[in-house]
Structure formats: structure tokens, C-alpha cells
Image (spheres, rainbow, N blue to C red):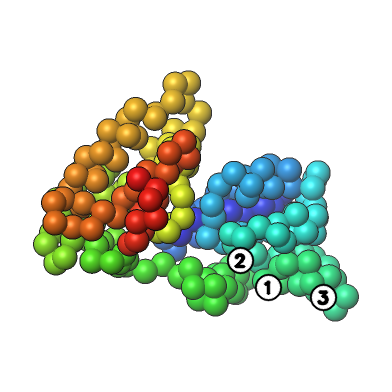
């Protein structure tokens, strides 16, 4: 579960990040509005903790810019402004919830969990696509009830594809999220393609309907129906 914290007070941001990491979440910090907006425009997050008053692009501007995004994550707006008109302004511009500073971390955590439940993004320990299933906790995979033996990287790759099943995943996204090498000087395209080929051979073996598909010139998609993307 990946959460972005957009907060210009470094002490507050790191305190939230540490608390979320202790709860098992992946938490990342952006200290300016511009940095936060750039990350939201180029990466996929499950939830955002967004401060209202930020250097550069402020929280309301970010909310307005994200309004038309189909994949907009739930957003919890943080602010010291407690007037009813301020709350209405934040919610009307796309915030999913509102928390006034100072706040207790326990309340922040409860609100984030509520947002994840409402959005259907709450972390699950098992995912399924057609007859393919993975156990995220045990790091095991099955196809038609037969266990598929995967290397650690193959499992991470499959888990990421299943997390966004039905959506196109680019090589850039895989390099950043699975290989954790966004700033590599040479592309990871060949490495990614080799791992995809090995993964596809294991889960789309003879007799099974192909699930891992290549969208030429774009990336990959894992889905249960073949729309001539291969």
C-alpha cells in the first residue's frame, strides 16, 4: 500500500512517514507542492496526505489539477484552517476527507484506513485474476490450483501486474516500482523483457488461457480476456 505525504514541514512529514511505515505502509514524502504534483502525475499511489499550505503549488491547486484524472487516489487534506467555509472549499475541490492540525496520529491513521475501505483500495492478502491466484503474505502463486514456482523478482513482477490488472503497465513503471531503479543511466528494458518472458512461460504454460499480454510500444497488461493486444 503506497502513500504519498505532501507536507512542507519536514518534522511533521517524517513523523507521519515513520508512523505509517510502522503500520506496514510504504510512505513517501514530497516537501513542496510542485514536487508532490509531479510525483502524482508520474507515479501511482493508493492514497495521499496533502497539506493545504505549501510552497509553490498549494493543496487546493493540486486538488483542482487532479480532478479529471481517472486514477485519482483518495486524498486526506491537512490544514490549520478550521472554519466551515475552508472545509467546504477543500471538499468541493476534490478532497475526500479533512483533518485539522494539530492532530493525533491515531486519528490520522483511522481516517486513512476509512478512506482505503471506502475506495476499495484496502490491502488484501490474496489477489485473483481468472484462475491465477497469489498469496501476498506467503509469496506463493497458483494457476488452476497448481502451484507456480517463482523467483523473488518474478513474484514481485507478477504481484505488481495483478495489482493493476486490466491496466497497462509501462517498462518505466516496472523499473521504478519493481526494480526500484528510477534513475539508472541505462534502461532496464532488456532485463524487464527477460523476466516477463520467463514469468509468462510459467503462468501461461500450454493449456492455459494467456493472461500476460504485451501492448506493443507501450508496455504490458495482465487480464483475463485477450483483446488482440499480444
Write down the residue under mark 2: 74
- Classed neighbour count for the residue bearing mark 1: other residues with Cα under 10 Å, few (<14), some (14–19), many (≥20): some
Whether pointer 2 and pointer 1 mark residues with C-beta atoms closer than 8 Å, the reply is: yes
- Location of the C terminus (image quadrant): top left
At 34% from the left and 35% from the top, the residue drawn is: 192
Tell which circle, 2 or 1, labels the residue nearer the N-terminal end.
2
On the picture, is 203 further left or further right than 124? left
Q: Give the spatial CA distance, label 2 vs label 1.
A: 8 Å
> In percent of the image, x 43 and y 39: which residue is there?
216
**Residue 114 occupies quadrant:** bottom right
Placement of the N terminus among the 4 image quadrants: bottom left
Circle 1 sits on which residue?
Answer: 97
User: In the drawing, does residue 150 fall left or right of residue 63?
Assistant: left
Question: Foreground residue, 108 or 114?
Answer: 114
Element on which disc 2 rests: loop
Q: CA distance from mark 3 to mark 1?
A: 10 Å
Query: Which sits in the foreground, 63 or 226?
Result: 226
Could you tell which of marks 3 and 1 lies nearer the N-terminus? 3
> In what element is the residue under mark 3?
helix
Q: Is residue 198 above or below residue 100?
A: above
Q: Classify mark 3: residues with Cα within 10 Å, few (<14), some (14-19) or many (20+).
A: few
Q: Is residue 137 above or below residue 197?
A: below
At a point 16% along the width and 50% down the height, the residue shown is 205
Q: Nearer the viewer, mark 2 or mark 1?
A: 2
Does residue 29 lie above or below 225 as drawn? above
The answer to which of 181 and 205 lies nearer the viewer is: 205
Q: Is there any visible trace of residue 10 in the rendered image?
A: no
Place of residue 120 in the rendered image (x, y in percent of width and height, measured from the top left): 49, 73
Instruction: Tell me the distance, in whole angstroms, between the alpha carbons under discs 2 and 3.
Output: 17 Å
Q: Secondary structure at mark 1?
A: strand
Residue at the disc numbered 3: 88
Report which quarter residue 191 is drawn in. Answer: top left
Amino acid at each position: 500500500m503506497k502513500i504519498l505525504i505532501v507536507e512542507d514541514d519536514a518534522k511533521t512529514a517524517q513523523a507521519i512517514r515513520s508512523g505509517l511505515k510502522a503500520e506496514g505502509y510504504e510512505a513517501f514524502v514530497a516537501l513542496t507542492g510542485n514536487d508532490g504534483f509531479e510525483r502524482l502525475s508520474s507515479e501511482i499511489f493508493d492514497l495521499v496526505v496533502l497539506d493545504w499550505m505549501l510552497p509553490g503549488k498549494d493543496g487546493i491547486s493540486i486538488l483542482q489539477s487532479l480532478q479529471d484524472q481517472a486514477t485519482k487516489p483518495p486524498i486526506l487534506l491537512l490544514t490549520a484552517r478550521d472554519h466551515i467555509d475552508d472545509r467546504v472549499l477543500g471538499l468541493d475541490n476534490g478532497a475526500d476527507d479533512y483533518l485539522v492540525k494539530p492532530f493525533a496520529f491515531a486519528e490520522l491513521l483511522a481516517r486513512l484506513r476509512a478512506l482505503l475501505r471506502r475506495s476499495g483500495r484496502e490491502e488484501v492478502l490474496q489477489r485473483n485474476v481468472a484462475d491465477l491466484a497469489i498469496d501476498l503474505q506467503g509469496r506463493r502463486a497458483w494457476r488452476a490450483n497448481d502451484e507456480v514456482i517463482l523467483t523473488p523478482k518474478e513474484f514481485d513482477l507478477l504481484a505488481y501486474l495483478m495489482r493493476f490488472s486490466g491496466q497497462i503497465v509501462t517498462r518505466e513503471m516496472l523499473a521504478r516500482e519493481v526494480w526500484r531503479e528510477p534513475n539508472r543511466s541505462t534502461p532496464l528494458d532488456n532485463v524487464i523483457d527477460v523476466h516477463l518472458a520467463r514469468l509468462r512461460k510459467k503462468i501461461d504454460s500450454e493449456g492455459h488461457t494467456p493472461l500476460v499480454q504485451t501492448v506493443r510500444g507501450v508496455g504490458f497488461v495482465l487480464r483475463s480476456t485477450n483483446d488482440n493486444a499480444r
